[in-house]
Image: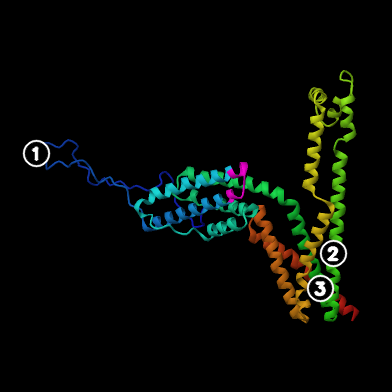
Amino acid sequence: MRGTETHHSHTRDTPRRITWHTDSMPSDPHPTASSPTSPGPDTSLQPQPPTPQQRRRWRRYLADEQAEGAVYRELAQRKDGEERAILLGLADAEKRHEQHWRNLLGDHAGKPRRGSWRSRLLGQLARRFGGVFVLALAQQAEARSTYDRDDDAPAHMAADERIHGEVVRALATRGRQRLSGTFRAAVFGANDGLVSNLALILGVGASGVSHSYILLAGLSGLLAGALSMGAGEFVSVRSQRELLDAENPSPHAHRAIGDLDVNANELALVYRARGMNETDAHAHAELVLSNYSETTRLAEDIDADKHETLGTAWGAAGSSFAFFASGAIIPLVPYLFGIDGYAAMAVAVSLTGLALCATGAAVGVLSGASPLRRAARQLAIGLGAALATYALGLIFGVTVG
């Protein structure tokens, strides 16, 4: 992972440029005794010393490598097993890159420097939070490496950074999969609450009604939307669990395996119906018959894992209710504090815009995309819907009036 400053050049053959001076070569390759004093061995072949700009850049690279290695070690402390080993392997790789810049700097390394603000931010986040958000940020930082455009960084180091990015991407993907259900409900619920209630408040406010009517409409919209979201999520999760139950093997069928005639049964047809070819189905059926109790236990474990991943219907309903309400309350804040008129609308739009940017940026970080672009997209969509409703409120207000 590297800072964003770029050093362009057309060649990358060596980590340091070397200029050879040949102006002192003798014109006569075979001087005679009468020739002037023969020159001794040519000692002018010296590498060009690094410029101050190069040294500054190398020190910055060194500081970044040190900071990024510390990030991986911090994350490793929060993990165990394979993920811990992978993160420690990345930290060792950053240490290898550190040594490259130390070798180039030699006695000019100086005192340890602070890394770039991005590296320092990653370190703070890793110490306080860890988790998928930091991995997603680390993935973006690895992708910003400028080693492939810098003569002083060997090609293998630039390639290392690309591979590191893929390693971090894979680790972040694990976290995204574990977080996807809850995060999806949080983002969608909060966004629905933000946009729908802001649109409702602006539409009602544009019609010219009093402050109390706007507040009542906003609170009604909050409760109606949150209850609707909770009920919808309850039905959705309950239906998914019922579908999973329908797909899983019947426990009665598993208990019947022990009573089957080993020489004449249709157990292989079960596995053929599930997609196995005839040979594999017969082999699997023989294995099941030889140890059916273990098969039953394994099937129950798989069933439990699926249900654990899906979660409970009541838990999903409660989360959706809370997420929607947390978003819908934000446009109501100025009205709850007694602000009225266009000032209240302006404050509501500003607060909602900030919240939309925050949720959009969070989605961008988790998806490995640009947080700024995702925030701008979220803001444009949300405010666009709210402004359209405001325009309709103006039209209806004039018509009714």
Image check: 334 left or right of 27?
right
Q: Which residue is mark 1?
A: 34
Tag 2's secondary structure? helix
Tag 3's secondary structure? helix
Q: Please tell me how crowded label 3 is: few (under 14), some (14-19), or many (20+) other residues with Cα within 10 Å.
A: many
Q: Which residue is mark 2?
A: 225
Q: Which residue is mark 3?
A: 201
Q: Amino acid at mark 1?
A: Ser
First in sequence: mark 2 or mark 1? 1
Residue 282 sits inside the magenta stretch:
no
Q: Amino acid at mark 2?
A: Gly
First in sequence: mark 3 or mark 1? 1
> Does residue 289 sit above or below 119 in this rendering?
above
Picture quadrant where residue 261 is located: top right
Q: Amino acid at mark 3?
A: Ile
Magenta: main secondary structure: helix
Range covered by the magenta-colored residues: 75-84
Between 200 and 325, which is closer to the camera in this rendering? 325
Nearer to us: label 3 or label 1 = 3
Q: Please tell me how crowded label 1 is: few (under 14), some (14-19), or many (20+) other residues with Cα within 10 Å.
A: few
Residue 78 sits inside the magenta stretch:
yes
* Residue drawn 38% across the image and 49% down it: 104
Q: Quadrant of the C terminus?
A: bottom right
Does residue 392 appear in the picture of this structure?
no
Image check: 242 left or right of 72?
right
How far separated are the C-alphas under marks 3 and 1? 105 Å
